Image (cartoon, rainbow, N blue to C red):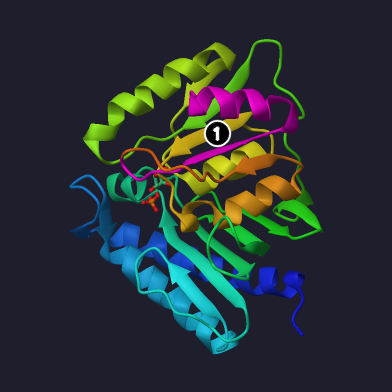
Amino acid sequence: MTSAAQLAELATDIAREAGVLARQRREEGVRVADTKSSIADIVTEADREVEALIRRRLREARPEDGFVGEESEPEHGASGITWVVDPIDGTVNYAYGIPHYAVSIAAVQGVPEPAEWTALAGVVYGAVSGELFHAVAGEGAFLDGRPIAVNPEPSAAGALLATGFGYDPRSHAGDLAQVERVMPYARDLRRFGSAALDLCAVACGRLDGYFERGLKPWDHAAGGLIITEAGGRIDVGSEPDDFGRVLVVASGPALFDRLLTAARGA
Ligand code: IPD
């Protein structure tokens, strides 16, 4: 039987290889291959190629496992373990040459839906920074092998927060209203462009909290485990808004309930 730590080791090796490929393709020039939910929601040829590489490596190592990825068809496995993968989280950054994007790989057990799965291992690899975040269920969260922890509470100046905005322009008014509700708790607000890295930033105390509507399972599967193993809390949402988007909120324990209530706005 494979341990969760071994799954994390496998994910680490593959994420590093995938990150090198993503960086190399970026240096060669990015081609947008398609759009998805809206004209602003792009997929590059590199997203697809990097996901294919990750999928191939996982299949070679663990042919019985399932796979859910951002850019290809899901596949059920026989082992009860599913890999949830975002090959390039921060695709718009990637396309514009902003060096802030990541490979995100998680191994989950059970039904591969965020509300139902048990995350076993998660890896987020900052492909340009070279920073490797990982977590193993029950064994902690780490940045480049060193243990990390969330900020237990924000400073008196308020919380340093990050968020993201949906690709559908019709949802922007709701997102801005959400920002207005949350700002009384904030010292400032960041929009970095990679949800996986935002979650890791909360996990290691670079941010106090993060909230966003519209994330997909692969955006938060690995980062969510890294948050909880770093002593933080995350809610991955259950009630979709008018655009079908669920709300994800993550922070250290002291801020969590206030941030969730303000972000929900109900
Ligand atoms: C996106 C990024 C972005 C977030 C979007 C995500 P992608 O993922 O994480 O920060 O605001 O909601 O879709 O498309 O670059 O993998």
Q: Quadrant of residue 214?
A: top left
Total numbered labels: 1
Left/right placement of residue 136 relative to residue 264 reads right
Compared to 44, does 252 lie above or below?
above
Asked if one can make out residue 15 in the rendered structure from this viewpoint, the answer is yes
Compared to 116, does 148 lie above or below?
above
Left/right placement of residue 14 relative to residue 120 reads left
x and y, in percent, of residue 82 in the image: 56, 73
x and y, in percent, of residue 207 in the image: 61, 31
For image coordinates 44% across by 79% down, the residue present is 75
- Check disc 1 and give the amino acid type: Tyr
Compared to 181, does 17 lie above or below?
below
Bounds of the magenta segment: 243-266
Q: Farthest right residue?
A: 139
Asked if one can make out residue 131 in the rendered structure from this viewpoint, the answer is no
For image coordinates 41% across by 74% down, the residue present is 74
* Residue nearest the observer in this picture, 173 or 14: 173
Compared to 29, does 15 lie above or below?
below
Q: Residues within 10 Å of mark 1 (few under 14, many from 20)?
A: many
* Residue nearest the observer in this picture, 101 or 225: 225
Circle 1 — which element? Answer: strand
